[in-house]
């Protein structure tokens, strides 16, 4: 997946054969914020303008802009996996949150 990040907001970018340009959308938000560009330079400029406009519009509406990710993540797993992860965390002298965070970091880096 091709992504761009600006002011903490990340966009997924694809090339649209139909439109003959790059198209991007902010990810991790309920609001829909999109942009496009014929070149990478134009795409980046339009991405920055889209984020800035989103922040400005939120302010004008008296609403706090949505944050892409809160840091909270609810994950459902099988009870036996939950038990094994908890045991592994305790054995390592860590909280389950610390242990899972480190496991996710290792998986992403791999």
Image (tube, helix red, strand yellow):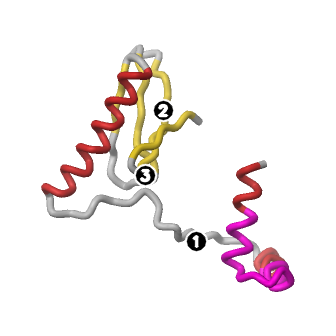
| SS for dot 3 | loop
- Rendering quarter of residue 62: bottom left
Residue beneath disc 2: 13
Q: Which residue is located at x 40 percent, y 54 percent? A: 29
| SS for dot 2 | strand
Q: Earlier in the sequence, mark 1 or mark 2?
A: 2
- Rendering quarter of residue 43: top left
What's drawn in magenta, residue-wise? 86-103
Q: Is residue 53 left or right of residue 77?
A: left
> Is 100 rendered above or below residue 50?
below
**Residue 44: x and y, percent?**
39, 30
**Which of the numbered marks, if any, corresponds to residue 74?**
1
**Residue 92: x and y, percent?**
83, 80
Image quadrant containing the N terminus: top right
**Residue 20: x and y, percent?**
41, 14
Label 1 environment density (alpha carbons within 10 Å; few <14, some 14–19, many ≥20): few
Disc 3 from disc 1: Cα separation: 21 Å
Residue 46 lies within the magenta run: no
> Is 22 rendered above or below residue 93?
above
């Amino acid at each position: 997946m091709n992504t761009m990040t600006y002011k903490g907001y990340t966009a997924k970018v694809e090339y649209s054969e139909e439109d003959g340009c790059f198209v991007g959308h902010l990810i991790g938000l309920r609001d829909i914020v999109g942009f496009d560009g014929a070149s990478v330079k134009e795409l980046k400029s339009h991405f920055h303008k889209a984020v800035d406009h989103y922040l400005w519009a939120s302010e004008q509406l008296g609403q706090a802009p949505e944050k892409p990710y809160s840091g909270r993540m609810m994950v459902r797993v099988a009870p036996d996996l939950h038990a094994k992860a908890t045991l592994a965390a305790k054995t390592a002298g860590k909280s389950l949150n610390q242990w899972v965070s480190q496991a996710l970091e290792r998986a992403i880096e791999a």
